[in-house]
Amino acid sequence: MGTGSLAPSSSKVEFRKTIFGYTPKETPFSVLHPLARIMIVIIFNIPFFIINPFLNACFLLTVLIFYKIAGIPKAYLLKFTPFLFILTFFLFLSFAFFPSVWIQPPYKHVIFQFGFTYHYENFIASATMWVRWMSAIFGILFVLSIIDERDINIALKTLRFPYFFRFIVATALRCFFTFYYDAMQIIEAQKARGLDLDSMGMFRKAKYYAAVMVPLIMIELKKADEMADAADSRGYVTTFKSEEYKRTEYVGHDVVMKLHDKLFIVFAVTSLIAVIIARYLPGIGPIIKWIPDDPAFWTSLIQRVF
């Protein structure tokens, strides 16, 4: 029998537990130093200094392409869909009643009237802010999906933060998502016992979610106690003063920052500074701060495209 039909073992994708969840172990971003990977957050927070929704849409599209390149499962992104819907709702609701800081009233272009007047200016301000927030949120989630506690420890160690501070930060990020997964596990256990949350109203559902907090807090307190015992048994000392406590660290001793890592960090920081400075330049500033405040812009754009 031939062996050509057998799939090579290298075709299997290995996963690892990151801050975000189980994601591919090896990605094109794995070649970067942990500090360089964390610096990706800076790039996708640049939209907070840009108003132009088209420029910010490019950042959002880029981070979504990064998800595809890294092979991050779509299921993890879908878990944050309720949060994104809530954020979208409050963004559009807030700008529906309050004027935008980018477009000065009075507003002229009415979309509809239903107890209050909703203008085009309210809508475009909400959409512009939505693109900014989505780029930052997806950018942060992307970074959390390609790093783990060890990477955070190495990155902070490179910046010469004390060990105790690094331990707190890495543990807090890990426990944040552990808290979420424990809550989902309790809810799934309740569903297995016949609890149908989907058929309940909002207030009744909130009542049951409040009941979930009791076992959840007990579980997290137990885990915190076990973590404290494990830290004590391994000789961890709770002090920020390194001169009071010396320890030999082996984490990250084999990880070296290479030239491409330094260039990427310089690129991220320089890009942020460049955008901040460009906001005040006479030629580029108006482009960065531009917002399509007239609906006639979309009509002319469609006519040019088609």
Image (spheres, rainbow, N blue to C red):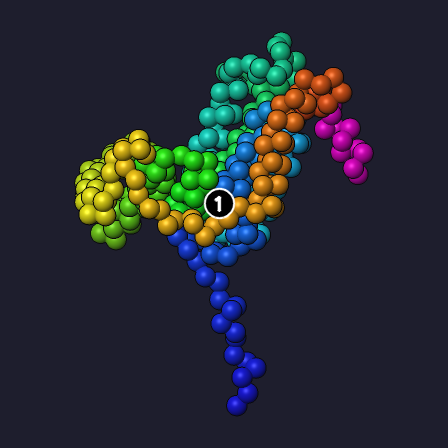
Toward the bottom, the furthest residue is 1
Q: Residue at x 35, y 46 (%)?
A: 249
Q: Residue at x 30, y 43 (%)?
A: 247
Q: Is residue 72 visible?
A: yes
Q: Is residue 24 left or right of residue 122?
A: left
Q: Which residues are magenta?
A: 293-306
Q: Residue at x 49, y 66 (%)?
A: 12
**Residue 19 found in image quarter:** top left
Percent position (x, y) of residue 83?
Answer: 43, 36
**Residue 177 found in image quarter:** top left
Query: In this figure, which residue is indicated by the disc labeled 1?
Result: 34
Q: Residue at x 28, y 46 (%)?
A: 182
Is 16 rendered above or below residue 157?
Answer: below
Which residue is more in the foreground, 120 or 1?
1
Percent position (x, y) of residue 144?
Answer: 45, 43
Q: Is residue 73 left or right of residue 163?
A: right
Q: Give the structural element (helix, strand or loop) at label 1.
A: helix
Which residue is more in the foreground, 84 or 42?
42
Whether the magenta-drawn stretch holds residue 213 is answered as no
What's under tag 1, amino acid-wise? Pro
Q: Is residue 159 left or right of residue 193?
A: right
